[in-house]
Amino acid sequence: MKKVLAIALALCLVLSLAACGGSGSSAPAASTPAASTPDAGSTPAGEPMGPTLSFKLAENQPDGNPITEGMKMFAELANKYTDGTVTIEVYANAALTDEASSIDQCQAGTLDFTRVNTNSLAPTVDEFGVFAMPYLFTSVEQKYAALDGEAGKMVMDTLGDYNMVGLDYFEAGARCFYTTSKPIEKVEDLNGMKIRVQQTEVAISMVQALGANATPMDYAEVFQGLQTGIVDGAENDFVSYYTSGHYEVAKYYSLDKHMEPPAVLICSQKAWDQMTEAQQEAIVRASHEAAEWQRVAMQEYQDESRAECEKAGCTIIDVDIQSFQDAVSSVYDAYPQYAEIVEKIKAA
């Protein structure tokens, strides 16, 4: 697929630019485990940056997905900026473990890094559930301002209480409903339908408020669930809808854009503590640059994924978003613990 090749070429270009001393653009002001973004490679000349370390990173998306390619870029840059002392092997397509298990393992220190959706993280760290609130962001610009600002840092810092270190927020697209047997054109069409959702209370509450039956299910099981009728539909962004193959069995995609939970890159506290300060600084720098590239790549791939789905015969449906917003307004009242963070996000 031409997009996969384009992503690979872009990755090589960015890494080549990095080798020449820069990423081609300014580093993003993303949340970091430190108070400010440090410069990597600050050890005195001739002194080793730190011990030689080998880590594993769990990723549930397939090769070619901009999130997976972003993780590969992070691993390559981490190796470069640590002077080759830190090697991170990326296991794509849930080859190592699924998202929920990767969080547990990262917290326990038996897995070094994982990239997960904040919806998957919320059952363990409740604060991340705020990003599942429906229609939370008003634009891409406002979303990044919130994630890279005070609101994002408030949430990311809570990982320290769970033996994990948060690095950066990555783009995961806008989630929409897609179904197998009938299109979702209005709120009432969801009545009684079994919709796969991620295992997070806010997502479940939102789908129930729309009149559907929320059905939590591991991502790797969704294709079969759609194919066999265990669920009538699911919800995800265009890239995941396309790269997962879900578009082959669920041909109706409704553009309600109910949720935009970001992805997040996490390091276990155990792995973090094995690194010297210089290595940690290099890891932060690598994560920032990978996140900056991935956000742009994901936005571009959304458009191409939609085009490929339409070419395959999928029906893309515009809906009255306001009616969906009105139907889920009660969700905000049900989660007062998020009120302060929601206010900061809205003000970003």
Image (cartoon, rainbow, N blue to C red):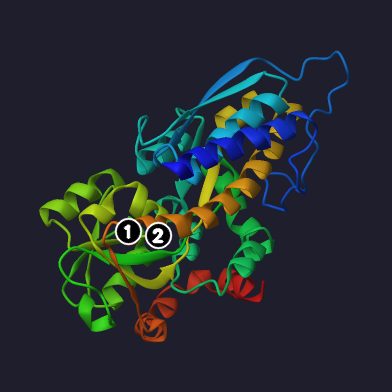
For the residues bearing labels 1 and 2, Cβ distance under 8 angstroms: yes
Residue 28 appears in the figure: yes
> Label 2 belongs to which residue?
307
Q: Which residue does the image show at 68% across and 15% down from the upper left?
A: 51
Q: Which residue does the image show at 28% across and 47% down from the upper left?
A: 218
Q: Quadrant of residue 258?
A: bottom left
Badge 2 marks a residue whose secondary structure is: helix
- Tell me: residue 68, above or below residue 251: above
Residue that extends furthest to the left in the rendered view of this protein? 228
Residue 237 appears in the figure: no
List x then y, in percent, for residue 164.
55, 40
Please tell me the numbered disc located at residue 311: 1
Badge 1 marks a residue whose secondary structure is: helix
Of the 4 image quadrants, the one containing the N terminus is top left
Q: Which residue does the image show at 52% across and 43% down from the upper left?
A: 162
Q: Amino acid at mark 2?
A: Ala
- Tell me: residue 312, above or below residue 276: below
Label tally: 2
Residue that extends furthest to the right in the rendered view of this protein? 45
